[in-house]
Image (cartoon, grey):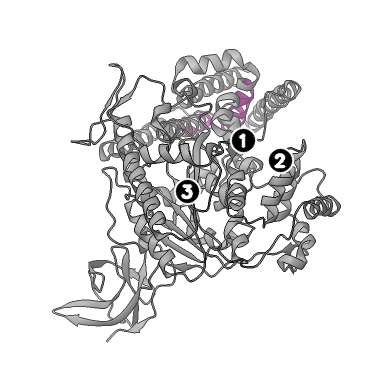
Amino acid sequence: MFILLKLYLNSFLLTFFVEMLGRQSFMKAFRFLKKSPLNFSCNMFIIALTLCIALLAPTRRRFIQALVSVFWIFLGTVNCVIRFYRMTPFSAEDFRLIPALMLILKNYVTPPVIAALALLLALTVAALVFLFVKLPREHRKFRHVIAVFVLGAAISAAGLYLTNRQISRTKSLSENFQNLAEAYDDYGFAYCFINSMMHAGISKPNNYSGKRIYALADTLKENGGPIVSGPVEGQPDIIMIQLESFFDPMYMRNDFSFSEDPIPCFRSLKEKYPSGFLYVPVVGAGTVNTEFEILTGMSTEFFGAGEYPYNTVLRTTATESIPNILSSRGYESTVLHNNTGTFYNRVGVFSQLGFDRFIPSEYMYDLSYTPTNWARDEVLTGLIADVMDRSEGPDFIYAITVQSHGRYPAEKVLEDPLITVTGPEDVNVNPVEYYVNQVREVDDMIRDLVDHLEKRGKPAILVLYGDHLPSLGIDEERLLQPDIYQTEYVIWSNIGADTIRRDLQAEELSTAVLEAAGIPDGIIPRFHRVFKEDQNYKKYLHMLEYDMLYGQGYIYKAFSSELGMERRRDGTYRAYWRSQLELGLDPVTIDSCSEENGQWVVTGDGFNESSRIVVDGKVLDTTYVDRHKLILAADMPKDASALKVAQCDENLELLGDGTEEIPVS
């Protein structure tokens, strides 16, 4: 029994320490224990169950218990660091992002911090080795080992069951985390993290059936024209720009003052054109979940805790989206992003969303970078203009900015900032000053783009919105706006629009944009228009999303005469398929390769810093000279037969197939 008492004391201390790390405060952890003892107990019994593994070890129980304890402390530390940098807690979904996160680690963490973390990891390993050697071995009989394990596991499982049963009566615990940060604060780290491991995708609604979906479709048919329409004369170009970590700094309630307005253009636009607050699903990070809601009109609320649909269902499933809706009207859809195309699996996902072309940073030229190594957004204005100039029909252009991305340095890195910030003596203004100067440059990009569209004179709609608040440690107590999950949007156009201010959910914005363009098409947009005020709106949306992404696809069958529909071998119905995604605005081509002065030189067109020489399928070190010339920085393999040029991210992952191969001669 003494062994079990120590185990539960250890569980209690571990739970408190992990909560203290996640909340970055001893007192906040204590308030969680005091205010929500059942939720705290639930987390404690989860940790206790994992510690029970040590009870199965007849000789190394203490070491294994120490190992499991270190594991929980490691998870808690990672959560603490992640919440410090991006505000959104650590979930199992983050493990999927490890390769992509390595690409941007330098943008977040300075070399001294990386060195300190490496030292801490080395010390932890050394401590575990020391414990393995020094902790005394026990010699317990097999029957005693099994008896103690069964008793400990039974007590932990019973405690977990009883606390959950009591919690379910008070409804103080949930498996549905619409607000991930609040869920971790309300329910505790262990419970939320385990939940994020066990639940992914959209659960099947209890009342899901073909009959209910067909009834839903009948209502949609009765309230509007066709779901799909053909091209119409005078259709406007539609440009949507997702502004990274963009919000009005004037909303910060901390006595900050700015030498001038950080966002004069955006402020002017939101006063003259339709605008409002936009309720987004994330704060501080998780851009692609806002992106998903905007492009599909679906809500991420019904997915697993912390889940990114880009990394799960959209890897294999095409769905209705703005590009797919607009394709029947003759629109060409292009997406631009001045960051790597492999992050969040975008290079794969955008074909599932029906885009025709993707231009990531690996296919851009003349990029300049901020002091924290994010590409500046000024490059996007010219690219948007080039895309529209080359198109014969209307364009849908979706641009994803990155310049104002965190981290925001605590030290002063801008020697002569355009905007200076003053604040209370006890507050470090450097992160805020850095942020507002980056946002000002983004605002300049917006001004230049609006000027271009006005001079161009063709019908156009420009939609601007923030993906989430910046990771500046902002909470509701420091905000003048209603909610930390709200950014702002504005819909500029030169085709006439009333200056209406209304607040929207992120999944509703695409419907508002299509309405502004006079396009009533699409299943999800019509659903929002018809059912928004219905008391069963959320229930029906849950059912519709499940049907389109995971279910039988009855809704596609219901509209098969308009959409075109395929019945797959598994009996499900689908109306959308992966598009043939073209990468870059201009093709990368290769003309020749030859050996010159002991170096292999490749000539062609469209090269940039991301171009790599690939010999017989192997990516080799490459020196970029200019758009027409590359030099092989490694030895040419003796048995080399053919080579090509491909665009690669920093992990040397290829984006696309590359050029045609030519023989090595």
Residue 507 in percent (x, y) is at 61, 45
Answer whether residue 59 is magenta in the image: yes
* Residue with the mark numbered 3: 97
SS at circle 2: loop
Q: Indicate whether 505 appears above or below 25.
A: below
Lower position in the chain sequence, tag 3 or tag 2 = 3
Question: Which quarter of the picture shows residue 169?
Answer: top right
Name the amino acid, label 1: Gln
Of all residues shown, which one is farthest toward the right?
211
Residue 178 is tagged as 1
Asked if the residue under mark 3 is in contact with the one under mark 1, i.e. CB atoms within 8 Å, the reply is no
SS at circle 1: loop
The residue sitting at 38% across, 73% down in the picture is: 587
Q: Residues within 10 Å of mark 2 (few under 14, many from 20)?
A: some
Q: Can see residue 368?
A: yes
Name the amino acid, label 2: Lys
Residues rendered magenta in the picture: 41-67
Q: In what quadrant of the picture does the C terminus appear? A: bottom left
Q: Is residue 264 shown left or right of residue 57?
A: left
Closest to the camera, between mark 3 and mark 2, is: 2
Q: CA distance from mark 3 to mark 2?
A: 34 Å
* Residue with the mark numbered 2: 532
Q: Residues within 10 Å of mark 3 (few under 14, many from 20)?
A: some
Magenta segment, prevailing SS (helix, strand or loop): helix
Q: Indicate whether 620 appears above or below 343.
A: below
Name the foreground residue: 605 vs 69.
Answer: 605
Name the amino acid, label 3: Leu
Closest to the camera, between mark 1 and mark 2, is: 2
Q: Indicate whether 434 appears above or below 185.
A: below
Q: Is residue 167 shown left or right of residue 485?
A: right
Q: CA distance from mark 1 to mark 2?
A: 18 Å
Lower position in the chain sequence, tag 1 or tag 2 = 1
